[in-house]
Every structure is written in C-alpha cells, then in structure tokens.
Image (cartoon, grey):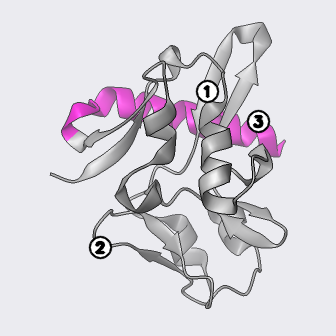
C-alpha cells in the first residue's frame, strides 16, 4: 500500500521544528521561508495547523503547468518539480487550492516527501506528522484536514 504524509493538527504544539528541518534539508538554510511545510498559527482559536502538499490525486498544479515541470514520482507518488523544465511562471502556485506551492526567489517550492523519508516526520516530537500507509490515516480525518486546509488557504489569499 502506498504511503502518505498524515497530519494530526490536534497534536501540533507549534514548535515549528518541522519548518526548520525541512528548510535545512531542502535549501541548506534554517530559514522557515524555504520550508515546504509551514505551521499556520491562529492564537485566538488556539489552532496550530501544519500546512503542506497533500499530493492531490488530480493535482491541479500539474494540469496548470505549461511546461510539464511538475511530474508524479513513481516511487513516492509525490508531485515533484523538474527544475530544468520550470520557467518560474508561478501558475502552479495559483492553481493549488491549498496554498501548498509557494514561489520563493522565483522558484516554486512544495513538499516532495524527501524521496520517501520525510525529514519533518523524523523530527516531530509531538507525533503530529507521520508517514504511513494511506490506510492508517482514516479517510474522514484526511478529508477534514483537507477541508480545513482549503479554508485556511482561501483566508490567506483574501
């Protein structure tokens, strides 16, 4: 059975270590702006919500890319950016309904599951992040996460 990044936002403590280790692994810097995961913090709601690519089955970002620079990795099922094909147009960022792709320094960045060993999961002390077979993240819980992720992305876009 395929694996997926599962997120239990109720376990998130907002330590944001996931952001730091992601940025270090992917960009060689402890700058959270380079992270492929980010924690949305809503203090008034006591909400700490890790936001990252959910590797959509229909992947609107892939459909929108004019140069086919977004492809599905056969091993991890992650949508990955082929940098040589990317023209840095930003269309993928606009196409993502969840705000999971961001353009930083002109380049699109998104979670690519670290080749099947997500660094964020290894360092998540609270257990909010896991990388398990898709059956271990119940469909109702996954859908509730996706729905809330979409709401937060819409709010962020204004």
Residue position for label 2:
74
Check if mark 2's residue and mark 3's residue have beta carbons within 8 Å.
no
Pick the residue in front: 103 or 139: 103
What residue is shown at x 44% (from left), y 24% (from top)? 8
- Percent of width and height locating residue 77: 33, 64
Marks 1 and 3, how far apart in space?
Answer: 14 Å
- Percent of width and height locating residue 149: 58, 36
Mark 2 vs mark 3, foreground winner is 2
Q: Is residue 143 left or right of residue 98?
A: left
Residue 155's mark? Answer: 3
Marks 2 and 3, how far apart in space?
Answer: 33 Å
Marks 2 and 1, how far apart in space?
Answer: 28 Å
Tell me which numbered mark, 2 or 1, is placed earlier along the sequence.
1
- Percent of width and height locating residue 96: 62, 58
Residue position for label 1:
49
Looking at the rendered structure, the secondary structure element under dot 1 is strand
Pick the residue in front: 153 or 8: 8
Looking at the rendered structure, the secondary structure element under dot 2 is loop
What residue is shown at x 61% (from left), y 43% (from top)? 21
Tell me which numbered mark, 2 or 3, is placed earlier along the sequence.
2
Tell me which numbered mark, 1 or 3, is placed earlier along the sequence.
1
- Percent of width and height locating residue 108: 70, 68
Q: Is residue 118 left or right of residue 12?
A: left
What residue is shown at x 60% (from left), y 48% (from top)? 22
Check if mark 2's residue and mark 1's residue have beta carbons within 8 Å.
no
Looking at the image, the residue that sits furthest to the left is: 1
Main SS class of the magenta portion in the image: helix
Specify the quadrant of the image occupied by residue 151.
top right
**Chain part drawn in magenta:** 135-158
Q: Does the magenta portion include 129?
A: no
Circle 3 packing at 10 Å, graded few (<14), some (14-19), many (20+), is few
């Amino acid at each position: 059975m395929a694996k997926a990044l599962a997120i239990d936002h109720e376990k998130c403590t907002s330590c944001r270590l996931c952001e730091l280790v992601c940025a270090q692994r992917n960009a060689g810097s402890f700058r959270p702006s380079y992270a492929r995961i980010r924690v949305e913090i809503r203090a008034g709601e006591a909400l700490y919500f890790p936001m990252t690519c959910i590797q959509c089955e229909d992947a609107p970002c892939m459909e929108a890319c004019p140069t086919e620079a977004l492809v599905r990795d056969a091993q991890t099922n992650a949508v990955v950016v082929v940098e040589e094909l990317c023209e840095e147009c930003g269309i993928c960022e606009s196409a993502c309904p969840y705000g999971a792709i961001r353009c930083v320094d002109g380049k699109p960045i998104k979670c690519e599951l670290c080749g099947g060993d997500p660094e964020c999961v290894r360092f998540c002390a609270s257990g909010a992040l896991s990388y398990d077979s898709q059956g271990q993240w119940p469909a109702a819980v996954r859908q509730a996460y996706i729905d809330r992720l979409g709401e937060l992305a819409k709010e962020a876009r204004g």
